[in-house]
């Protein structure tokens, strides 16, 4: 498949590139400094700012899938959704956040007393983005929320999925490595199971 990754130079974006290339897909990396990425077989790069909707739409033309890894505070939903629709990309996947996952009936993680204030603005913007997707009628979208702790780590090839509730392991830890998150994202691209849905991954 031809996969475009918006925000490709970030920590998640680079791991998505690795996983997609590992599986033999053709990847177009899009970000303000995409051409800083090292040349690799199957990878093309294009410097694009999401603030330039026309340029982003042109860069997305002809792609089978688009993945947005852009921080929610850095782009309003329409800055991503508009160009994807304009370009006619059949499917959009979004690197989501854990803040909008439920930790108790009626309570999302971002609204829990223990949620760190430093991450609150981004988490609330992520919830707004998810709500914007849920009102979309034209796009085939998927929003993939990681677990609470989401950091670079080991590619184990093991993960489990959930829907709207925060996942935790047997010890109560909620976590997923960026490497295994990338596996889950590419698995969803290759074998769609959550079209027009949010789901989550964790250990």
Image (cartoon, rainbow, N blue to C red):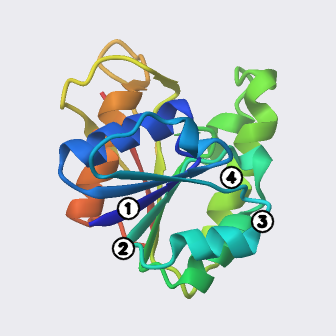
Is tag 4's residue or tag 3's residue first in the polypeptide sequence?
Answer: 3
Is tag 3's residue or tag 1's residue first in the polypeptide sequence?
Answer: 1
Where residue 78 appears, as percent x and y from the top left, is 74, 70
- Residue located at (46% from left, 32% from top): 147
Judging from the image, what secondary structure is the residue with disc 2 in?
A: loop
41 up-or-down from 147: above or below: below
Where residue 64 appears, as percent x and y from the top left, is 36, 73
Decide which of 154, 158 is in the foreground and name it: 154
Image marks 4 and 2: residues in contact by CB distance under 8 Å: no
Location of mark 4 (residue): 127
Foreground disc of the pair 4, 2: 2
- Residue located at (65% from left, 68% from top): 56
Residue 201, visible in the rendered structure? no
Decide which of 19, 177 is in the foreground and name it: 19
Location of mark 3 (residue): 52
Image marks 2 and 1: residues in contact by CB distance under 8 Å: yes
Is 54 positioned to the left or the right of 172 in the image? right
Location of mark 2 (residue): 64
Location of mark 1 (residue): 3
Is 164 positioned to the left or the right of 69 in the image? left
Image marks 4 and 1: residues in contact by CB distance under 8 Å: no
Foreground disc of the pair 2, 3: 3
Real-space CA distance between mark 2 and mark 3, rounded to the nearest whole angstrom? 21 Å
**Mark 4 crowd level (few <14, some 14–19, many ≥20, 10 Å Cα):** many
Foreground disc of the pair 4, 3: 3
- Residue 39 location, quadrant: top left
Real-space CA distance between mark 4 and mark 2, rounded to the nearest whole angstrom? 26 Å
């Amino acid at each position: 498949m031809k996969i475009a990754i918006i925000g490709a130079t970030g920590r998640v974006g680079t791991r998505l590139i690795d996983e997609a290339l590992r599986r033999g897909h053709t990847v177009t990396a899009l970000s303000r400094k995409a051409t800083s990425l090292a040349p690799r077989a199957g990878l093309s790069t294009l410097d694009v700012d999401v603030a330039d909707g026309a340029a982003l739409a042109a860069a997305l033309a002809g792609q089978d899938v688009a993945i947005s890894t852009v921080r929610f505070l850095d782009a309003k939903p329409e800055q991503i959704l508009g160009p994807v629709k304009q370009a006619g990309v059949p499917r959009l996947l979004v690197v989501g956040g854990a803040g909008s996952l439920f930790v108790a009936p009626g309570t999302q993680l971002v609204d829990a007393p223990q949620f760190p204030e430093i991450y609150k603005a981004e988490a609330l913007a992520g919830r707004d983005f998810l709500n914007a997707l849920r009102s979309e009628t034209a796009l085939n979208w998927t929003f993939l929320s990681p677990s609470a702790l989401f950091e670079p780590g080991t590619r184990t090839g093991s993960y489990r999925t959930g829907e709207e509730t925060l996942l935790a392991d047997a010890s109560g830890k909620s976590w997923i490595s960026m490497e295994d998150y990338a596996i889950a994202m590419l698995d969803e691209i290759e074998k769609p199971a959550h079209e027009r849905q949010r789901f989550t991954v964790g250990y």
